[in-house]
Image (spheres, rainbow, N blue to C red):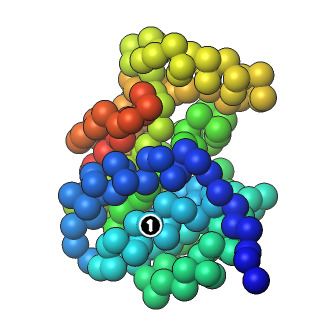
């Protein structure tokens, strides 16, 4: 019997270039907190390629079940059971982590939620850890491409709180909680992988 798994073409397209960078960052045994696991494609691809990691999938309570079919089918020993995580709640239902990974979430969350995400991570990220945030970002208030401008317009028609975030604003949030932008990698399709460290 064939199971139709939730699928994201964007995840399929970007998982290889993201993994190439994550190999360099998540280079020792540890636990990765993934915020916004979605379909589970990233979780399965990254956990399979990096068996030295424990991968903790999470998602907003409204979407936390989406990843379960794929994770159950993969049955990887280093993927922990997914948990519900609303970044605006306190305390977070995760005891500890070494690194954080989140893809295509900052432009979906409200700005207040982005602030709270950075706040919680800043409080708990250990020395030597990193917060890797993937997605489209503006720089000094400017769009990096026409496609990102159109995507931003699309997001704002869906919900007024959505929109592509500016790198300067994110760096200010990070600085307020003791994090700094250590790396800013160019990625395919006008995306970036931002790496914040303590």
Q: Which residue lies furthest to the front in this view?
A: 1
At which x and y percent is residue 178? 32, 44
Depth check: 157 or 32 in front? 157
Percent position of residue 29, x then y:
27, 77
Q: How crowded is mark 1: few (under 14 residues within 10 Å), some or many (20 or more)?
A: some
Taking the spot 48% from the left edge, 83% from the top edge, the residue there is 76
Asked if one can make out residue 118 in the rendered structure from this viewpoint, the answer is yes
Residue 41 position, x and y percent, is 54, 62
Q: Where is residue 111 in the image (x, y as percent from the top left)?
A: 61, 33
Q: Can residue 83 be seen in this view?
A: no
The answer to which quarter of the image holds residue 60 is bottom right
Identify the residue shown where x is 44% and y is 66%.
45
How many numbered discs sit on the rendered protein? 1
Instruction: Please tell me which residue is depicted at 45% across the width and 21% down the height of the picture.
Output: 138
The residue lying toward the viewer, choosing from 183 and 73, is: 73
In the shown orientation, is residue 13 left or right of residue 172? right
Which quadrant of the structure image shows residue 134? top left
Secondary-structure class at tag 1 = helix
Above or below residue 167? Residue 105 is below
Name the residue beneath numbered marker 1.
45
Residue positioned 64% across, 38% down in the render: 108
Which quadrant holds the N terminus? bottom right
Residue 175 versus residue 30 in the image, above or below: above
In which quarter of the view is residue 191 placed?
A: top left
């Amino acid at each position: 019997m064939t199971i139709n798994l939730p699928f994201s073409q964007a995840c399929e397209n970007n998982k290889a270039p993201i993994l190439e960078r994550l190999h360099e960052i998540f280079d020792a045994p540890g636990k990765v907190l993934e915020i916004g696991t979605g379909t589970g494609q990233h979780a399965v691809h990254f956990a399979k390629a990096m068996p030295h990691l424990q991968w903790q999938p999470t998602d907003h309570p409204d979407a936390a079940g989406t990843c379960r079919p794929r994770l159950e089918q993969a049955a990887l020993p280093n993927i922990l059971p997914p948990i519900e995580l609303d970044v605006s709640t306190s305390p977070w239902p995760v005891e500890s982590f070494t690194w954080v990974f989140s893809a295509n979430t900052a432009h979906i969350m409200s700005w207040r939620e982005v602030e709270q995400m950075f706040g919680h991570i800043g409080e708990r990220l250990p020395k030597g850890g990193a917060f890797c945030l993937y997605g489209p970002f503006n720089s000094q208030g400017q769009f990096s491409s026409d496609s990102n401008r159109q995507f931003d317009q699309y997001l704002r028609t869906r919900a007024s709180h959505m929109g592509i975030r500016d790198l300067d604003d994110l760096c200010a949030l990070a600085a307020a909680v003791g994090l700094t932008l250590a790396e800013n990698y160019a990625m395919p399709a006008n995306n970036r992988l931002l790496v914040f460290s303590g």
